[in-house]
Amino acid sequence: MRTLFLSLLLAHTLDAQPQGLTIVAPAAPGGGWDQLARTMARVLEGERIASAVQVENIPGAAGTVGLARFVSGRRGDPGALLVTGLVMVGGVVQNKSPVTLRETTPIARLVGEYEAIAVPASSPFRSLSDLIAELRRSPGSIAWGGGSAGGTDQILVDLLAQASGIDPARTNYVAFAGGGEARTALLGAQVQAGVSGLGEFAELARAGSVRILAVSSAARISGWDVPTLRESGIDVVLANWRGVVAPPGLTAVQRDRLESAVRTMQASPAWRAELERRGWDPLPLGGEAFGRFAESEMRRVQQLVARKQGGTTPVRTTRPSPLLIAGVLAVTLLLGLRGRTTRVARVRPAALAWIATGIGLNILLSEWLGFVAGAALLFGCTAFAFGERRRLRVLAVSLVFSVVVFVVFRGALSVALPTGRLWQVRAG
Amino acid sequence: MSSDFVTGLLTALTPFHLLCAFGGAALGTAVGVLPGIGPAMTVALLLPASYALEPAAGLILLAGIYYGAMYGGSTTSILFNVPGESATIVTAIEGHKMARHGRAGAALATAAIGSFVAGTIGTLLIALAGPAIARAALAMGPAEQFALIVLAFAMVTSVLGERPLLGVASLCLGLLIGLVGIDAQTGEARLTFGVAQLLDGIDVIVVAVAFFAVGESLFLAWTGIEQATPRASASSVRLTGDDWRRSVPAWLRGTLIGFPLGAVPAGGAELPTLISYGLERRLARGGREWENDGAGAIEGVAGPEAANNASAAGTLVPLLSLGIPTTATAAVLLAALQQYGLQPGPLLFQSEGVLVWALLGSLLVGNAMLLVLNLPLAGFWARLAAVPAPWLHAGIMVLATVGTWTLHRSSVDLVVLAALGAVAFVWRVLECPAVPVVIGVMLGPLAEQHLQRALTVADGNWSAIVGRPATALLLTMAALVVTGSLVMRWRARRG
């Protein structure tokens, strides 16, 4: 038992070695940012550009949760990269995030995808000009289907309206939970036009189910007989770009090392093969130039949102009022409980206090002492609360259970449970 | 077509491929029972294991993993009341009550066989009429989907119980929790109190785990009931004749509900399970075992489990015939299929005939393998539910925190879990029902989103929503369900 615990302590220490690279994907496993992070990790390790590359997922709020934690927790860490992109730029503005990309060290823009505007095959609109003409006549009559509110798709619709001289706040944008739902709505002609990455429409367009009216690139995309927005008289170029940034507070040497590692990766055949396989377009842009580009994207989105919020168009949707719901809750609860007494004969507040202590210790200590310690405390307190009084046995079962859970999650599945900051501080 | 299907099935039946299916089902079950790891994450985590194989074998391994992961999630729900993903929350309601009354084996068995029946029927339906179903499903717009949610609300009013006022209070609590986060249509934050981690809302899993597991454990520790009355340990895996008679129709009804709802992306797998639960409870017309402290009704496990698997098969319809993933799991499957050079889309059935049929064949085999693997295992799992109360509840508390932490890897979620656990404890002491709270969290945001989308599409015009034929039909059905139950309640009170 003791040796097992010691070896786990050792594992904590090894984890905290400063060598190696952590790529933070500010999204759950499976999405675009996560795939980029994992692809980078594979190529960086495979080409021996970096060793011990780990991917850490910090999902939430269009990447702004990951951004905030990256900036505060990784300051000055030369071994960390954060995946970012246009969606995060939108998220920062939309969620009024106190932390922005300006607080990071720009490293490189890597890949991107251009947007496409499509209509159902049965649509009367043959060209973008047809669609824009109808939009000018009656902005509300065109329902645009796309991804989440404030994301790349809506940004494009807003830019398009703005460039056509229409108040973006008057557009009828329908936010779907994902590209999949939006495409279903487009196929069923539930919306008049769809906005999404070109790749998402590719199969449907080839099968003739949808018609692509325009793409958002500066020049035509090879393999597609589709005009750009500019050709259609709309001066807008927009790419759903993705790149990486480093934490703030790096020295020039540290920054150069990261930049050159990423450059070497982009030049490798393995990277190009991955891009080919995944259908990502390379959009390389390094260091300072990438910093300026990100800055201009931030300003563009900020202006758009500011203009929309300054608009006078009334909010169309009916929204439930939290106060109303809370009121109904209070009234029904009071009426329902009137004249009733609880029937519990004998209560044991001490047991309750034990479990509450366990929960509290678990939350407070997991981050510092690691999962094993936190979970063992919670387990022990709960078992004690339920009347188990053999202390040694409680201790032993708690530790064994927590260690097993830890090993299964971290070892077999590489799902990182907290290892404890205290051990890392010591090792560092 | 049928000969292609037979060829595909035969491909899946070679000894090596059967081994792959078995290995996949075993791996998937093993990972799926872990709290917080649902089918999407299981498939994503185990996907690299299938890269080394040739396409047919890889697809078969994947199918096994997929079904294994789905079934694994139900196991934790039934045994520990700690649902690992939203689709198995409903299973926990009756399933865990059965487990507490020594019927864990029967609950697991009806879940396994129900999943098999639904998965098999669903796969055959895809093979026979996939593209046609996909085209029909496209007619369901935001307005119809909103009406569907209203019908779901009407169906589940039966869970409000014998004290409807407290049921409504619980539902409102759920709706309130469901409001937390970014409004999907406008992007505005609500009730987040400046905490960035709350912008994505409170995951329904956290709410379910807080109300089903944490609050319950706190309550039992407080009252000391658990120590006084030892759990029924006798747990037979065998389904009795009565179990069969009640399970079979529930499986079929669940399949009928789940498959079409899976093909129409109207809110993930939890919607069909919820509607199936509401229907079974309505058909049963009350009965002691459905009550809060009852023994658990087997239909309440059989129906939702079948609905869950059938809807998983249903989501393959838009995935394969339109190339559109409508759930997280489907998105991961799409990535996997593309790795094997299969490009799902309208042209898939013509261009890649052989592999598609091999995939459908392997889904059937993976499904059957799951039954072979899990029926014997049900006995083992059931014994696990009979460990002494202190260890059981200690384990439940740790699994609850692990499952919650794994969702977003954030200690904010743990604080939310603790706070909701405290609310759940108070709720339990006041004898308010927990299930409507969870249902409010599930259905509230869906109803709001679909209504807002429908209103946006209709440019704010309500009559355009109500006036659509399918919408009018669904809304009328909802009204009938509600008035029907009011009339029955009134009659019961008079008679």
Image (spheres, rainbow, N blue to C red):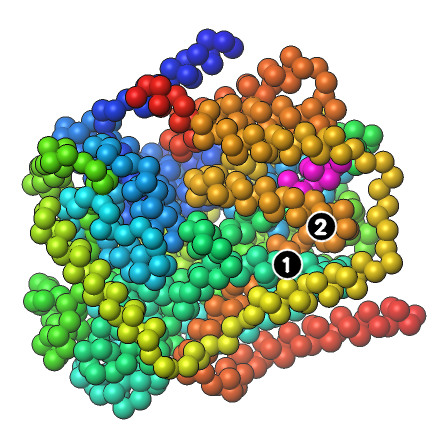
The residue shown at (20%, 32%) is A78
- Chain part drawn in magenta: B214-222
The residue shown at (73%, 76%) is B483
Measure how far apart labels 2 and 1 are at the Cα level. Answer: 10 Å
**Residue B173, label in figure:** 1
Residue B52: x and y in percent read 28, 34
Q: Is residue A384 visible?
A: yes
- Image side of residue B383 versus residue B315, left or right: right
- Quick one: label 2 or label 1, which is nearer the N terminus? 1
Residue A172, compared with residue A401, is above or below; it is below
| Marked residue chain, label 2 | B
- Residue A207 falls within the magenta-colored stretch: no
The residue shown at (29%, 36%) is A74
Amino acid identity at mark 1: Leu
- Image side of residue A136 versus residue A5, left or right: left
Q: Residues within 10 Å of mark 1 (few under 14, many from 20)?
A: many
| Marked residue chain, label 1 | B
In the rendered image, which residue does mark 2 sit on? B427
Q: Looking at this view, name the residue that lies furthest to the top.
A: A3
Residue B283, compared with residue A78, is above or below; it is below
The quadrant of the picture occupied by the C terminus of chain A is: top left
Q: Looking at this view, name the residue that lies furthest to the right.
A: B495
Residue A194: x and y in percent read 29, 72
Amino acid identity at mark 2: Trp
The residue shown at (77%, 61%) is A334
